Amino acid sequence: MGKDSIRLSSSEIGGLWSSYLQENLTVCLLTYFLHHNQDEEIRGILQHAYDLAVGHVEKITAIFQKEEFPIPDGFSEKDIDLTIPPLFYDMFGLYFVNSLSRLSMIKIGFITANVARQDVMELFIEMTKESTELYQMSTTLMQKKGIYDRSPMIPYPKEVEYTKKLSYLSGFGKKRPLNAIEITEIFYGIERNYFSILLCMGLLQVVKDKEIHHFIKEGKKISEQQIRTYNELLMREELLGNVSIRTEVTDLTDNPFSERLIVTLFHLLNGVDITLLGHAISTSMRTDLTACFEKFLMQILVYSAKGVDLMMERGWFQEPPHAPSRRKLEKID
């Protein structure tokens, strides 16, 4: 690092480090989907997503090398077996890219708002733009193929309304109808949990390790519970529940993914889900909804901790870069 260079701050280190692992894992998964996918339209989006992820890994690596910063241990071709037949049908690859781009917009946007060094800021601004474009591309194709569900329709308001009644916050007894923001949080909760169920369904067929199998099964139950609760909320409001997505899992029983990759993927998804549930709590004003979201947040926090314990037991958990212990440095023998 040159003497005139600006050092990376802790937020820049954290953003680059976590993004490297996520993008690296994404490259592996997209390599797998690309190898098996036969739908030309979906392959085009998969290839675009793959090229973006490879580019992100290379750019983050270049910054780390310039700073003489250790490159995190990522994933490689050793973590996927392309000789094994596909675990998912073609459409799941499109679901994957769509879900991934939505999650990336949220995570990368948060990172971008907390960095200042010019090269790092430019990288994350570019990644945010690319994630948004990828979401647009995948959503457009999902609509074309008839597999994209839009949130429930509500009438346009006829005028601006104000309320002075504290009952607006009540979620028990006589409750007001859900507002548009709350419906959005509920609907998105259903969508991302349907994706999680599909992922769990496939992995439960192929994972042989009993402890990891049990961990995935618990995650599937949590997602099923959330979907039931969210759908019941919508049904009670006569907004109808979200329709079930098509089963996109084959009958494969051989595992094409390393166990480390699988558990790390769940760890990353849990982190995003915690962020999104926190956002849902902050935007919902009916007390029954906030109680529901808080319950699920605590559930995911406990489940996520089990995943971290599992990774630590297997020697798979990489410590994020951290501040030094000043007490240890100041200790005199």
Image: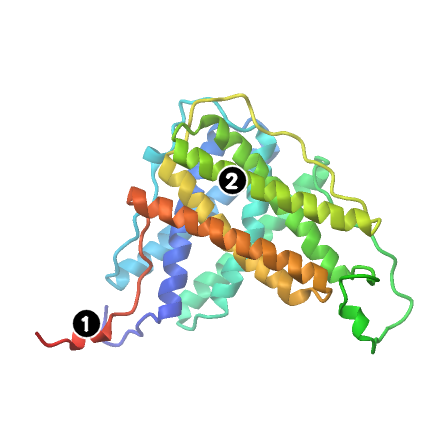
- Determine if residue 147 is in view: yes
Above or below residue 216? Residue 13 is below
The label nearer to you, 1 versus 2, is 2
| Amino acid type shown at disc 2 | Glu
The total number of labels drawn is 2
Q: In the picture, which quadrant includes the N terminus?
A: bottom left
Residue 314 picture location, percent across and down: 30, 42
In x, y percent, where is residue 253?
47, 22
State the residue at coordinates (35%, 35%): 79
Name, please, the residue furthest toward the left. 333
Q: Secondary structure at mark 1?
A: helix
Residue annotated with mark 1: 328
Report, in whole angstroms, how far the alpha carbon at label 1 lies from the one at label 2: 40 Å
Against 250, residue 199 (above or below) is: below
Local secondary structure at mark 2: helix
Check disc 2 and report the residue beneath it: 218
Tell which of 138 and 179 is nearer to you.
179
What residue is at 60 percent from the left and 56 percent from the top?
295
Whole-percent x, y for residue 274 in the image: 53, 56
Which residue is pictured at 84% across the width and 55% down the height? 154
Identify the residue at image location x=83%, y=75%: 165
Q: Quadrant of residue 251?
A: top right
